[in-house]
Amino acid sequence: MKTIKAAIIGTGFIGLAHVEAARRVGFVEMIALCEANDELARNKAAALNIPSATAAWKRC
């Protein structure tokens, strides 16, 4: 099956659950995370093993 690459924009109230749910599908690869600022994005991406992080949602 083909892998789908996805990004999450905002990890507030339910965002983290969406990341985990997407991964459990089995063919979704989370490649980017976008948050309110770069530092927050980097920290959350590192905690979730997501390779790219940014505060600029257009780059996700």
Image: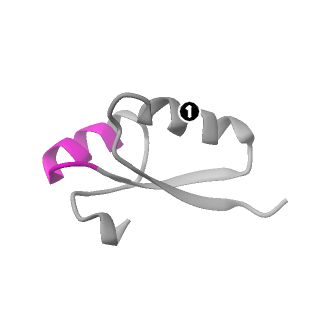
- Between residue 55 and residue 50, name the one nearer to us: 55
27 versus 48 height, above or below:
below
Residue at 60 percent across and 53 percent down: it is: 29
Local secondary structure at mark 1: helix
Question: What's drawn in magenta, residue-wise?
Answer: 35-45
Locate residue 44, reporting x and y percent: 30, 38
User: Left or right: 16 with respect to 23?
Assistant: left
Locate residue 40, reporting x and y percent: 19, 42
Q: Main secondary structure of the magenta part?
A: helix
28 versus 48 height, above or below:
below
Most extreme residue toward the front is 13
The disc labelled 1 sits on which kind of residue?
Glu
Q: Name the residue under label 1.
A: 20
Residue at 30 percent across and 63 percent down: it is: 57
**Corner quadrant of residue 13:** top left
47 versus 22 height, above or below:
above
In the picture, the quarter occupied by the C terminus is bottom left
